[in-house]
């Protein structure tokens, strides 16, 4: 099978089936991507942090943490590889991101409200590494 012919969510589902991971993990992790992307990019487009952006950051964090926990259970713990390490870093950054967003909103600091998207996009980009790394490794294995 040629992995490069598949789209992101479809490839995730295929990889999950190959390793026997429940389909619910794929759905939850993809929901994390959807929630987090909505929060980050709507904030970036609007140009200011709003409470509903924080709600989407938290939804993404919760979905990612739940999906990651399910992956840990399936794998028997955390794997010390690119996916495992960057996944842990991404969840920690997402937590810091959500807490910092809450602080900025509570303080009503206009300077940070209008500049917060810079940190948001950075965290989102870091989060993409563990999301896409299984696909990249599967494509590399398919090419070999």
Image: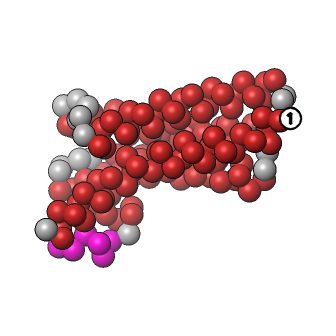
Q: Is residue 132 magenta?
A: no
Q: Position of residue 133 (x, y in %)?
A: 33, 52
In this picture the colour scheme is: secondary structure
Q: Nearer the viewer, residue 88 or 7?
A: 88
Quarter of the figure that contains the N terminus: bottom left
Judge left or right: residue 140 versus residue 62. Answer: left
Quarter of the figure that contains the C terminus: bottom left
Quarter location, residue 113: top right
Quarter location, residue 115: top right
- The residues colored magenta run 1-6
Judge left or right: residue 34 versus residue 44. Answer: left
> Which residue does the image show at 26% across and 47% down from the upper left?
22
Judge left or right: residue 96 versus residue 28. Answer: right
Number of marks in the image? 1
State whether residue 101 appears in this view.
yes
Is residue 2 placed above or below 36 in the rendered structure?
below
Q: Position of residue 28 (x, y in %)?
A: 42, 46
Q: Nearer the viewer, residue 13 or 57?
A: 57
> Which residue does the image show at 54% across and 29% down from the upper left?
95
Query: Callout 1: 10 Å neighbours few (<14), some, many (20+)?
Result: few
- The residue furthest left is 144
State whether residue 62 appears in this view.
no
> Which residue does the image show at 70% across and 27% down from the upper left?
102
> Which residue does the image show at 53% across and 53% down from the upper left?
34
Q: Is residue 4 magenta?
A: yes
Q: Position of residue 88 (x, y in %)?
A: 38, 33
Q: Position of residue 5 (x, y in %)?
A: 30, 76
Which residue position is annotated with label 1? 110
Label 1, secondary structure: give it. Answer: helix
């Amino acid at each position: 099978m040629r992995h490069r012919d598949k789209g992101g969510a479809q490839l995730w589902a295929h990889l999950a089936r190959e390793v026997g991971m429940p389909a619910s993990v794929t759905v939850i992790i993809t929901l994390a991507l959807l929630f987090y992307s909505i929060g980050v990019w709507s904030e970036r487009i609007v140009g200011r942090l709003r409470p509903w952006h924080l709600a989407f950051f938290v939804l993404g964090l919760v979905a990612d943490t739940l999906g990651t926990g399910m992956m840990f259970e399936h794998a028997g713990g955390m794997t010390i590889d690119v996916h495992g390490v960057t996944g842990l870093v991404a969840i920690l950054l997402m937590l810091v991101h959500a807490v910092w967003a809450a602080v900025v909103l509570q303080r009503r600091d206009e300077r940070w409200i209008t500049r917060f998207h810079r940190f948001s996009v950075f965290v989102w980009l870091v989060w993409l590494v563990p999301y896409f790394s299984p696909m990249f490794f599967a494509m590399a294995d398919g090419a070999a």
